[in-house]
Image (cartoon, grey):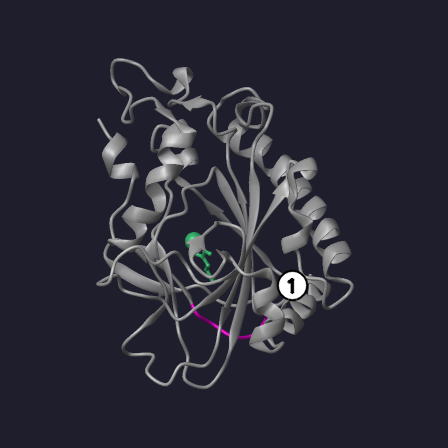
Amino acid sequence: MDGMMDASREFFRQPQEVKQKHSNMVDGKHFRLEGYGNDRVSSEDQVLDWCDRLYLKVEPEDERNLALWPAHPERFRDVLHNFTAQCTSVKDRLLPAMAKLLELEDDYFNNQFGDKPDTYIRFNYYPPCPRPDLVFGLKPHSDGTFISVLMVDNNVRGLQVLRDGVWYDVPARPHTLLINLGDQMEIMSNGIFKSPVHRAVTSAEEERLSAVMFYSVDPERDIVPAARLIDEKQPALYRKVKVKDYIAGLFQYFSQGRRVIDTVKI
Ligand SMILES: O=C(O)CCC(=O)C(=O)O
Ligand SMILES: [Fe+2]
C-alpha cells in the first residue's frame, strides 16, 4: 500500500507538462475516461471539484491502455499491477462472506460479475485549497460500482459519509483499506446493503491522495435484485437494468448532484 501511495504521489507532484503526456483530453479537446486530468466538463455552469485525477482500466488485463499508465516513476506500472491483484483478492474473499450474510449461495455475488467485468482505478489528488469552505474535493455521490476498494491518505482526513442527513468523517487509519458498497450491490441485495452517499472535502493546509478500485459487473449484463431476497412481503425495490446503460448516466447525474439509482427504484 505504501508503495502505491508513494508512486502515485510522485506522479502527481511532477510538472504539469510531464503529467499531460498521459492526458485524458485527446488533442486537447475530446474527453476520454482514461488518463490524467480533471472530470469531464460538460456544461458552463457545472460545479467543478478541487481534484486532479488519474483514471486507468486495470482489468481485464488485456484491455489495459499502457500508453496512459505513468512511465514515471518507473516502478509505477509494476506497483499498480501488484496492487490490483491484492485488491481483487480482497474483493474475491469479501463477497462470499457478504453473500452468506444474506443467506445466498457463497459464490452468488462473485458469479454476478460475468465474463468481462471492467475494473478501473481512480487516483484522486487534492492539492491544498485556499477556500475549503467554497469547494469540494469531490461532490456528494454514491459509487455506481458493485464494490469499491479505497485506499486513503494515511493521516489526512477528507472523506465523509452521509447517514440520516448528517455528514460523518471517515477516520484516516494508516494501512487500512476501506470497502465502499456501490449502487450495483444495493440493487442486487434489494436494498439490504446500501450504497452510501459520500464526498471529499478539501483542506487549506494539506494535500491529500486517495486511490479507488472500482469493481463493476460486465457492462453487457443486466442486474436485478437476487430472486431469493424477493417475496410477497418484500417485493423487488429496483427494476432490471443493463449495467452499460446504468454507467452511461452516472457522470451526468453526478455533475448535477443527482443519483442514477433513484431512476431504477420501483
Ligand atoms: O478521496 C476519497 O476519499 C473518496 C474518493 C471517491 O469517493 C471516489 O473517487 O469515488
Ligand atoms: Fe466515491
Picture quadrant where residue 145 is located: top left
**Depth check: 128 or 18 in front?**
18
- Other-residue count near label 1 (Cα within 10 Å), few / some / many at <14 / 14–19 / ≥20: few
Q: In the rendered structure, which segment of residues is drawn in magenta?
A: 154-158
| 142 magenta-colored | no
Measured as percent of width and height from the top left, residue 78 is found at: 77, 55
| Left or right, residue 23 beside residue 225 | right
| 156 magenta-colored | yes
Measured as percent of width and height from the top left, residue 244 is found at: 42, 31
| Left or right, residue 70 beside residue 134 | right
Please indicate, yes or no, whether residue 42 appears anywhere in the rendered image: yes
| Left or right, residue 236 beside residue 56 | left
| Residue at the disc numbered 1 | 175
Please indicate, yes or no, whether residue 193 appears anywhere in the rendered image: no
Which amino acid type is shown beneath numbered disc 1? His
Above-or-below relation of 117 to 142: above
Above-or-below relation of 85 to 47: above
**Depth check: 39 or 221 in front?**
39
Measured as percent of width and height from the top left, residue 112 is found at: 52, 24
Magenta stretch prevailing secondary structure: loop
**Depth check: 50 or 166 in front?**
50
User: Residue lying farthest front?
Assistant: 27
Above-or-below relation of 214 to 118: below
- The C terminus appears in which quarter of the rendering? top left
Say which residue appears at 24% left-offset and 31% top-offset. 265
| Left or right, residue 130 beside residue 172 | left
Picture quadrant where residue 163 is located: bottom left
